[in-house]
Image (cartoon, rainbow, N blue to C red):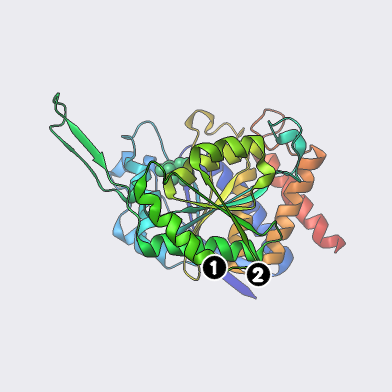
Amino acid sequence: MSSYDVAVLAGDGIGPEVTNEAFKVVDAAASAFGFSIKKSVLDLGTERWLKTGDIFPDADFNAVKDHQAIFLGAIGDPRAPVGLIEYGIIAKLRFDLDLYINLRPIKLYDERLCPLKGKGPKDIDMLIIRENTEDAYAGMHGFVHKGQPLEVATQTMVYTREGVERAIRYAFEACRARNGKKNVTLIDKANAVRAQDIWTRVFAEVATEYPDITTDHAYIDAACMWMVKNPEWFDVAVTPNLFGDIITDLGAMLQGGMGIAASGNLHPGQVSLFEPIHGSAPKHAGKNVASPVAGIMAGAMMLDFLGEKKASVAIESSVADLLRSGKLKGVGTADHVCSEGGDMVVEEVRAAVAKA
Ligand code: IPM
Ligand code: MG
């Protein structure tokens, strides 16, 4: 029986609740499909920092590295200075484990969940590939004359040939592998951020190796418009880190909200991290009202990455069926609580396996 080692960082706010539901489902799928998940739970996040001053000690980081996958619930808490925990945990994992792809599928499962008029599941099914280690996130920033009238603040957008190329290549490969329109769109702002000319050039070069795939280009401002106006135009899109951060929140709304959207921070072939796109939502924490769907879908992405494709598909289709039938609301509502969401999906996965 295959067994996988997963590090679990439940994190802040609603993180622990949604992580709990995600693993109810992941564990149920594991026993239904005959594999097991060995979890190591790590206490990292704002609570620990408040208590001990530790953000991500080396011993914890080394322990995390030794797993096949990492699951992160959510981090961030207004009691900590802006960015301290985010950079200390999520950015550290992304940079120090070189998780260079942020894979963010945007798929609408039921028309009811979409805020756009007249758009349904056949119109919204795209994969956003967000470069995950460079750009304005590279951490190269500074201040001089801080607090003075002459203060200068800078933040450098960094693009390396290798970083750009591996993200673009991943996008073409993902496009080839998926059953879509066989189109990759480059989203950038090369008309204003001239350094992004490197994206234009590398994209054109890599595209020549994929004659079976058509290409498109949109500046980020226009891409925001097209995603709302004609989301059906998008199949796979690849974009620098910061634009990818922004446009995937927009994408999450198209598929029903932050309670649904999941992501994988990947280094293919190495330990990779899976998380819901949503934040820690401190005001909803501990009330059992958060939607567990994004966490559960992040669990499904993790199983796919670990090679348990059947289990991953079973979870995804169970969630899709429950959303379509309206039993699972998908958005945080008082209609059902977080823990019932996990139970529903577990039941659905078991029933599907029993029928097969
Ligand atoms: C995300 C988040 C993070 C980001 C924050 C928490 C630093 O918004 O994963 O999309 O900006 O990448
Ligand atoms: Mg974000």
Q: Secondary structure at mark 2?
A: strand
Whether residue 107 appears in this view of the structure is no
Q: Along the polypeptide, which appears first: circle 1 or circle 2?
A: 2
User: At label 1, which amino acid type do we have?
Assistant: Thr
User: At label 2, which amino acid type do we have?
Assistant: Phe
Front residue (pair 59, 109) = 109
**Residue at image location 71% in from the left, 33% down from the top:** 336
In the image: residue 311, left or right of residue 163: right
Whether residue 145 appears in this view of the structure is yes
Q: How many marks?
A: 2
Q: CA distance from mark 1 to mark 2?
A: 41 Å
Relative to 216, say whether 80 is above or below.
above
Disc sitting over residue 35 in the figure? 2
Ligand 1 quadrant in view:
top left
| Closer to viewer: mark 1 or mark 2 | 1
Instruction: Provide the residue designation for mark 1.
Output: 208
In the rendered structure, are the residues bearing label 1 and label 2 in contact, judged by CB atoms less than 8 Å apart? no
* Residue found at the far bottom of this picture: 1
Q: Position of residue 259 (x, y in %)?
A: 61, 38
Relative to 89, say whether 97 is above or below.
below
**Residue at image location 69% in from the left, 42% down from the top:** 341
Ligand 1 contact, mark 1 (Cβ < 8 Å): no
Q: Position of residue 261 (x, y in %)?
A: 60, 44
Quadrant the C terminus occupies: bottom right
Q: Position of residue 26 (x, y in %)?
A: 64, 57
Front residue (pair 115, 31) = 115
In the image: residue 67, left or right of residue 87: right
Disc sitting over residue 187 in the figure? none
Relative to 113, say whether 109 is above or below.
below
**Residue at image location 76% in from the left, 33% down from the top:** 118
